Image (spheres, rainbow, N blue to C red):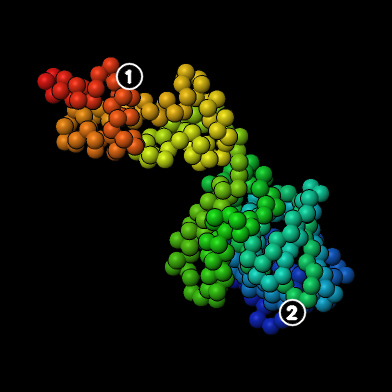
Amino acid sequence: MTEAQLDVMATDRPVGGGELSRAIGMSHLSWSFDPASTRELTGNVTSRAVGPLRISWIRLGLGLGAWRGERTEADIRSIPEPYLTVVMPIHGSIALTAAGTTTLIGEKELAIWDSTQPLSFALSGTDYEQISVIVPQRVLRAGADMCAALHCAHVDKNNVLSELCVQHMSTLARFLNSQLRPYEISLSNVTTSLFDAVLASLYKAPRDRDLLISELKNYIECYITDDSLSPRTLARAFEISTRYAHKLFELDGCTIGEWILRRRLERSTDDLMRGDWSITDIAFKWGFKDLGHYSRSFKRYYGKTPSAYRREATVA
């Protein structure tokens, strides 16, 4: 995107054909549009920079009932800086095609495309409306590998962050003609942080085995007092199978259940030594469902009852 393209631009009156396609091209990087379907195109474009971002709102009348375009290798080379675009149809749908796969994006759903890779789009119907945000990849936490992997990704309503992102983009579009200059950097930071969260929710990077084990153990430490913590809930939190989770813990010579039990017992000793809590309260605090289970488990692990452990600690 050139510096000239960062100026606020708007077509206050409906325009058509080549004039409209140029306005869309200026606000959405470089595209090669189908000439036949472009001649009958009419509509409006409102676009502005908000910090390093570009937010655009387009409303189109599809004179021939269709409009098509593509980002060719020449279009990609014309603007070498990598961008990521988040597109949200408000009225109508858009079909994006990349590497032979077509994805249909419906109303109030999101699509993501990476400016460094080819793609094509197709619109059909009588009219179409969308909001898009173009983000330089340099301002995202997501790296180039993640952006490339999510090219033409579809964020549907099943994604927990989808509605939050839809509402945010809709709000930004309503304020395109407002004085935002004093707040642009803050707004752009909020927007890129939200997009980073969406990207992270979609990207399933290969996990380093040792790092995953560390993350699983940290999760156990965080939820150690929750009596519902189990191998099944642990595996579900990390979107892995319970069988695989057990396999990871085999390296420590124990099962997940044994690891959880051991950490609960070890964490409970601090409370026993302080003497501020009753043994029953300590048992429930650390996720045991009854005092008997806690006392039996403690004796097997430490060779003495919780009461005896407390007495010896107090004497010492």
Q: Relative to 191, does residue 208 appear above or below in the rendering?
A: above
From the image, which quarter does the C terminus lie in?
top left
Q: What residue does disc 2 label?
A: 15
Q: Residue at x 16, y 32 (%)?
A: 275
Secondary structure of the residue carrying tag 2 is: strand
- At label 1, the amino acid type is Arg
Q: Which mark is residue 92?
A: none
Q: What residue does disc 1 label?
A: 300
Rendered image quadrant of residue 170: bottom right
From the image, which quarter does the N terminus lie in?
bottom right
- At label 2, the amino acid type is Val
Pair 2/1: label in front: 1
The picture places residue 212, in percent across and down from the top left corner, at 51, 31
Q: Nearer the viewer, residue 280 or 132?
A: 280
Q: Is residue 49 visible?
A: no
Rendered image quadrant of residue 155: bottom right
